[in-house]
Image: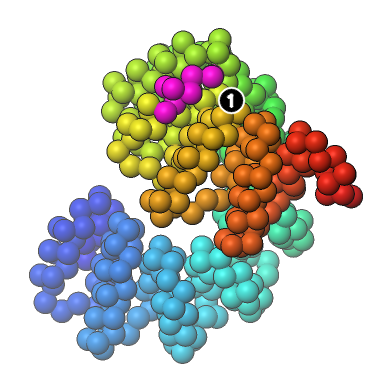
Amino acid sequence: NCLVEMYGKCGSLDKAWLVFSSIKTCNVYSWTIAIAAFAVNGDYSGALALFRKMDLDGVKANFVTYVNVISACSGLLDPRECKRVHSRVVEEGFDRDLVVATALVTMYGKCADFGAARMVFEKISSKNDVVSWNALIAAYAQQGLYRECVELYERMPVRANEVTFVSVVDAFAGLGDLEHSRRVHARIVEDGLENDCLKSALVDAYGKCGSPAESKQVFDSMVWRESSTWNALIAAFAQQRDSVTCVAILRQMDQDGVRSTELTFVSLLGGFSTTASLRAGRQLHSRVLAMGFYSDLMVGSALVTMYGRCGAVDQARAVFDGMEERNAVSFNSMIGAYAELGLARQALEVLWAMDQVGLAPDSVTLLSVLFSCSHAGLLGEGLANFRSMRDDRGMEVKLDHYRCLVDLFARSGWLAEAEELIE
């Protein structure tokens, strides 16, 4: 059993399975450890298959078994499997166990089934346990339901801990709420809960709220900085289009011996938006090639966006055409690059190519298309694409789309229609 656990924790699933298979008589602990090994290493289907085999062998599961099985369901994100396991938990009477119930809340949260998550949470007899509150708060934060996350935090009857604050800081970052981010930061300091994990979340939050100076202040107070924290700091300055500071942070990162990742360059390239920063952008492109990150979809799309913002649309197109694989983000980047320069015809050609490969346009695509048509005076094409995406594809139209539509009418001389749309 200990050997199975060891190999599982070391990521050697084949050896864990080999040892487990050699056990002549497996008890509940043997099965549970094996299920945990599969779940921890991302083989969720394998973990559930083991659970079914355990059932067939007549071995009765305990609460730890169910926690690991629920963890596997959380990774698999199969609603039917989640419901099936939940039913078994209720049948066996383990739904009253706080640890199992909390795992169920997390599972339903990851599946975005908040009705089921709340139902399980409300049935927990003890509402004074911070772990169950953290599970529900984290579920809302991870699904981008930031206001619901904050509302739960504010009505918590128990004292928040470090785990709570990571989710709450992420929520205020998602809302772009600088003032409340500062208040939560002050509360963290007041409660003596400052640690590098929370500080890393604060670096990210201040950046997303448009205050890179405060991001840097928190960053400088950290003892240990992972590459993700460096990336968050770079992103904070990139959001302000401060390419000079972004490059300076990269140099410091190199000096400190921290290895840059694909996300480092995605964040960095976001800071380049003028012809003056084009030379430095090209140097980063060379480094991307040297590090073998060119095939990464996010990096390739970021390069297309960077060249487009810097006015080098031909180089943006060369990168786009050279990509081995493209997704909706890649196409949006190319459409956006043409839109930046008002090259509506070319943007519409890329939109057509996107449709030909079976990729559905999204709200970002529509925004770029409307922007380019507006600046090129292509009223008919802009309206046709707006109606097609709204009516034929059922796309949710947002305020930014209507702003572009007003601009499209106004630039085309249709002032009465623009005024009517505003009203």
Residue 320 shown left or right of residue 420 in the figure:
left
Q: Is residue 12 left or right of residue 358?
A: left
Reading the image, the residue beneath label 1 is 341
Q: Of the residues shown, which amino acid type is indicated by label 1?
A: Leu
Classify mark 1: residues with Cα within 10 Å, few (<14), some (14-19) or many (20+). some
Q: Residue at the spot x=21%, y=58% of the render? A: 13
Residue 273, position as x, y percentages in the image: 57, 21
Rendered position, 129 above or below 314: below
408 or 280, which is in the foreground?
A: 408
Residue 221 appears in the figure: no
Q: Nearer the viewer, residue 343 or 120?
A: 343
- Side of 78 relative to 16 (left or right): right
**Image: magenta residue range:** 310-317
**Foreground of the two, 309 or 89:** 309
User: What secondary structure is the stretch in magenta mostly built from?
Assistant: helix
Occupied quadrant, residue 191? top right
Residue name at image x 66 percent, y 76 percent: 122
Q: Is residue 151 above or below residue 266?
A: below
Regarding residue 115, the answer to whether it shows in the image is: yes
> Residue at image x 73%, y 44%?
405
Q: Position of residue 192 (x, y in %)?
A: 66, 39
| Vertical arrangement, residue 134 with respect to residue 413, above or below | below
